[in-house]
Image: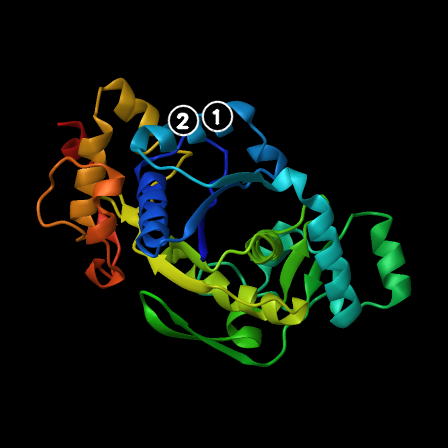
Amino acid sequence: MGKGRFAPSPSGRMHLGNACSALVSWLSARSADDAFSLRLEDLDDRCQSAENARLIVDDLAWLGLDWDEQLTQTARISAYQSAFETLCSRDHVYPCFCSRADLHAASAPHASDGTPLYAGTCRSLTPQQVAQKSRVRQPAYRIEVPDKTIEFTDGHLGPVRQKLAAECGDFVLRRSDGVFAYQLVCVVDDALTGCTQVVRGDDLLSSTPRQLFLYDRLGYGAPQFFHHPMLLSPDGRRLSKRDRDLDLGELRARHVAPERLVGKLAFMLGIIEQPEPCRPDELIGEFAWAKLPSHDLVVDGSEFLA
């Protein structure tokens, strides 16, 4: 038996886009008769909200989704430290003292996700320079990437290629505040908990080559990746917890039935032909990745509130 997962961050109340991702992740796993894991990505201090975590669990249960295990990242810090030390022993992992302002001020090209490519400013610092800079600022730690092209086949979007050095650049493993970075913790979590399929929004597609590089360097077997379309607001923005776009708390306060919400999502995704109310377990036999569109979807909140 394989395993899928949903890994939300308890930084705020789930919105409709989060609910869509949870539904697709759950259906992909259950349609394959796989186990399903709920992992709360609470490593960042800004995400350590017990109330938000409670609301995520409650909202998922309200939607009709279940899981076989529930995990938190804060309980797994020793695993991230071990992986970090392994990479330090095998690869060129180096301290980086550049601030966010430094990175954005650099006249460097940008990665596909919009972040500036790191110019390698701190890659060749001498031990004396490191010691001097450390007296002023705590460093982040980056891993040097090779001039290599990573190729994989996404289970939904097909072949993907990324040249690490030119399109990704050396990336952060541990932030300057000591928090391990997303790319590392995601790989460690998925590998050590036995995830065989990773389902997430296509906004994270560009992260996958970096993660596959880490799977290889850490000696882990990689899962299969599936990236689903994102839900966008009518003005083209990704739905955001910060902006409380179609907050599930608001939908529930307006007495939107979970079956109605699930049915509308399933219809938008092409899983069913009519937007009829249904429970997630009624969609298991209908789910197929070939039905989902490969483009992002614009959602008008009024159709869920009407």
Query: In percent of the image, x 33 and y 28: which residue is there?
Result: 62
Residue 196 in the image, given as x and y percentages of width and height: 47, 60
Query: In percent of the image, x 36 and y 53: which residue is there?
Result: 33
Evaluate if marks 2 and 1 touch, with contact meaning CB atoms under 8 Å apart. yes
State which quarter of the image contains the N terminus: bottom left
Q: Helix or strand or loop: what does disc 2 sit on?
A: helix
Label 2 amino acid? Answer: Asp
Marks 2 and 1, how far apart in space? Answer: 6 Å
Query: In percent of the image, x 37 and y 61: which residue is there?
Result: 226
State which quarter of the image contains the C terminus: top left
| Colour option used | rainbow
Q: Which of 79 and 204 is in front in this view?
A: 79
Q: In this view, does 267 lie above or below 243?
A: below
Q: Which of 184 and 194 is in front in this view?
A: 194
The numbered mark at residue 54 is: 1
The numbered mark at residue 58 is: 2
Query: In percent of the image, x 73 and y 65: which residue is there?
Result: 87
Label 1 amino acid? Answer: Arg
On the question of residue 109 being in view, the answer is: no
Q: Is residue 239 above or below residue 155?
A: above
Q: Helix or strand or loop: what does disc 1 sit on?
A: helix
On the question of residue 256 being in view, the answer is: yes
Q: Is residue 160 above or below residue 197?
A: below
Report the side of 74 relative to 242 (left or right). right
